Image (cartoon, rainbow, N blue to C red):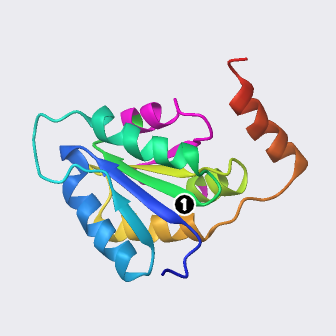
Amino acid sequence: MTDRPYHIYLATDHAGFLLKDNIKDWLVNAGYAVTDFGAHEYDAVDDFPDYIKKAAMAVSKQPATSRGIIFGGSGQGEAMVANRFPNVRATVYYGGNDDIILLSRQHNDANMLSIGARFVTVDEARRVIDVWLSTDFHVDEKYERRNRKIEKVLD
């Protein structure tokens, strides 16, 4: 049994395969419960939506108690897939200022992190994930209101 507050769902295609496996081992060693939706072997012609949708669906069903970390070349397409699911708020990181990660949690309560594996090192990914998992949502009426509006945007 883990003492960590979230179950972590991972997914990637070939572009993030090595980084995902490294991060998976690191998270398990840190005490997180982790489910890996693949890819489970390197295949240069696989398609990221096949894997990302599984992680997004899992987070969509348990948005308060789970987090998703997904990987791709840039992380952009992966976030686009994830954000199609209700209760999912995916943000993208491919390097740069860590304030992006802080604000994604503090203001948007992002529950999925999409990492551009072609642009970050293993150490940078670990650092950013650690910041992201340890940053709380700022409970504030305006942020809660905005997040509710995201869920209702198609109504």
Q: Residue at x 73, y 26 (%)?
A: 152
Q: Nearer the viewer, residue 99 or 34?
A: 34
- In this view, which residue lies farthest toward the top? 155
Disc 1 packing (10 Å; few <14; some 14–19; many ≥20): few
Per the image, label 1 sits on a secondary structure element best described as loop
Residue type marked 1:
Asp
- In this view, which residue lies farthest toward the right? 141
Q: Does 91 sit above or below residue 4?
A: above
Q: Is residue 52 visible?
A: yes
**Quadrant where the C terminus is found in the figure:** top right
Q: Position of residue 94 (x, y in %)?
A: 40, 49
Q: What residue is shown with label 1?
A: 98
Q: Position of residue 90 (x, y in %)?
A: 53, 43
Direction from residue 129 to residue 140 in the image, left or right: right
Where does the magenta region start and end?
77-99
Say if the magenta span includes residue 24: no
Q: Nearer the viewer, residue 118 or 25?
A: 25
Q: Position of residue 25 (x, y in %)?
A: 29, 73
Direction from residue 57 to residue 12 in the image, left or right: left
